[in-house]
Image (cartoon, rainbow, N blue to C red):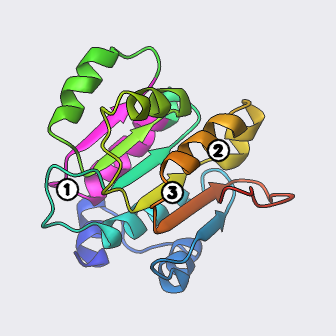
Amino acid sequence: MAIQTILERLDIAQLNEMQQTVVQSFREKQDFILLSPTGSGKTLAFALLIDQLLDKTKHNTVQVVIVIPTRELALQIESVVRKVSQGQKIVCCYGGHDSRSEKKSLIDAPSIVIGTPGRIIYHLERQHIVSDSIHTLVLDEYDKCLELGFQEQLEIISNSLAQVEQKILTSATRLDEVPSFF
């Protein structure tokens, strides 16, 4: 879908400079790191990338997994991604939410799964998320994930999704080093 149509739906006149740069510099099947301060519009930027990568003709297959550090961020990201990728099934999974209802939502597989590290691992291990069609992994707020001690869980998720063709990592702060599993 054209970016202008999405912006109209979001009631946004135009992308900011960072978002324009992201959209212009992104290359499919090349890992992408997005460093930008909190509140700069990273979520919209990577949501636009995800929307480009989705095969809208495929249904009942998970194509994208977005991993975020907290439930609050999961809900915020879900709201933006739903507006950008309108018409796509999206499931949000996080601790403190009924895992049985998440499991039921995952039976008719969504195109996009958004979740906290522990909950994503929970569903992957129980095969509630069928991973063979996942082509994109987004590690959002990577710096915050490290701060909260999720490095090992992120590595487990990344290793579980070895077939992924596209990884997108976002961070509000500069990284000392790119993670080995990225």
Residue 28 appears at what percent x and percent y?
45, 79
Which image quarter holds the C terminus? bottom right
Q: Secondary structure at mark 3?
A: loop
Which image quarter holds the N terminus? bottom left
Task: Determine the CA span between mark 1 and mark 3.
Answer: 28 Å
Instruction: Tell me: residue 102, above or below residue 52.
Output: above
Instruction: Tell me: residue 24, above or below residue 57.
Output: below
Residue 18 appears at what percent x and percent y?
59, 73
Residue occupying image coordinates x 32% and y 38%: 129
Q: Nearer the viewer, residue 93 or 6?
A: 93
- Earlier in the chain: of badge 2 and badge 1, it is 1
Residue labelled with disc 3:
162
Q: Is residue 71 magenta?
A: no
Residue 45 appears at what percent x and percent y?
48, 65
Q: Secondary structure at mark 1?
A: loop
**Is residue 7 shown left or right of residue 58?**
right
Q: Residues within 10 Å of mark 3 (few under 14, many from 20)?
A: few
Instruction: Tell me: residue 104, above or below residue 69.
Output: above
- Farthest residue, direction right: 176
**Is residue 167 shown left or right of residue 84?**
right
Q: Residues within 10 Å of mark 2 (few under 14, many from 20)?
A: some
* Cβ–Cβ under 8 Å for marks 1 and 3: no
Residue labelled with disc 2:
155
* Amino acid type, mark 1: Gln
Residue labelled with disc 1:
86
The residue segment tinted magenta is 74-94
